[in-house]
Image (spheres, helix red, strand yellow):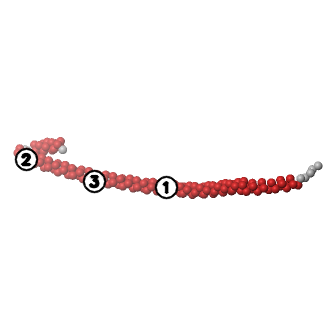
Amino acid sequence: MFDINWGSIIYQLIAFCVLLWLLSKFALKPLMGVMEKREQMINDQIDQADKDRKAAQEYLEQQRLAVEKAREEAQEIVQKAKKLSEQQGQEIVEAARAEGERLKEAALAEIQREKEQAVASLREQVASLSVLIATKVIEKELDEKEQEKLIAEYLKEVGEEL
C-alpha cells in the first residue's frame, strides 16, 4: 500500500531546509528589518505626536494665561480711565463752580458799583435841584404858600426824572 521512499523524504527535507535558510537569509531578514524600521518609525511618530500634543497643551495654557493677563490689564486700564474721568469731571465741576462764584461776585460788585454811582448821581441831581429851588425861591421872594407850591412842583419834576 504505502511505500515510503526515504531518499525522497530526506531530499525534500534537505531542500526544505535550504529553502528555509535562503528565505530567512534573503527574504525574512530584510522583511523583518523593514518591519522593525516601520515599527520604529510608527513609535517615533507616536512619541512626536505626544510631544506635539503636550507642547500644544502648554502653548494653549500659556495663551490662556496671556489672555487672562490681558483681560486683567484691560480691566485695570478701564478702572483707571473711569477714575480719571470721574476726577476730571469733578475738577471741571469745581472749576465751573469757582467760575460761577467769581462771576457772581463780579456781578454783585458791578451792581454795587452801579448802585453807588446811581446814588451819587441822584445826590448830585437832588443837590443841584435843591440849589435851583433855593435860587428860584430867593429870586421870587414868594410868600409861604407859593414857596410850598414851587417846592412841590420841583419835587414832582425830580420824581419824574428819577
* Mark 1 closeness class: few <14, some 14–19, many ≥20 residues within 10 Å: few
Query: On the picture, is 116 further left or further right than 146?
Result: right
Cα separation between marks 1 and 2: 95 Å
At 49% from the left and 55% from the top, the residue drawn is 70
x and y, in percent, of residue 140 in the image:
5, 44
x and y, in percent, of residue 47 in the image:
63, 57
At 10% from the left and 43% from the top, the residue drawn is 146
Query: On the picture, is 124 further left or further right than 55?
Result: left
Which residue, given by chain and number where applicable, does mark 2 sit on? 135
Image quadrant where residue 19 sits: bottom right
> Is residue 152 among what the camera can see?
no
Q: Secondary structure at mark 3?
A: helix
Residue at far front of view: 7
At 23% from the left and 51% from the top, the residue drawn is 110
Task: Please report whichever mark, 1 or 2, sits nearer to the chain's N-terminal start.
Answer: 1
In this view, the mark in front (3 or 2): 3
Task: Please report whichever mark, 1 or 3, sits nearer to the chain's N-terminal start.
Answer: 1
**Relative to the observer, which residue lies in front, 119 or 130?**
119
At 17% from the left and 48% from the top, the residue drawn is 122
* Mark 2 closeness class: few <14, some 14–19, many ≥20 residues within 10 Å: few
Q: Which mark is residue 105?
A: 3
x and y, in percent, of residue 162 in the image:
18, 44
* Mark 3 closeness class: few <14, some 14–19, many ≥20 residues within 10 Å: few
Q: Tag 3: residue type?
A: Glu
Task: Please report whichever mark, 3 or 2, sits nearer to the chain's N-terminal start.
Answer: 3
Q: Tag 2: residue type?
A: Thr
Q: Secondary structure at mark 1?
A: helix
x and y, in percent, of residue 115 in the image:
21, 50
**Relative to the observer, which residue lies in front, 83 or 3?**
3
Q: Which mark is residue 70?
A: 1
> Is residue 23 among what the camera can see?
yes
Q: Secondary structure at mark 2?
A: helix
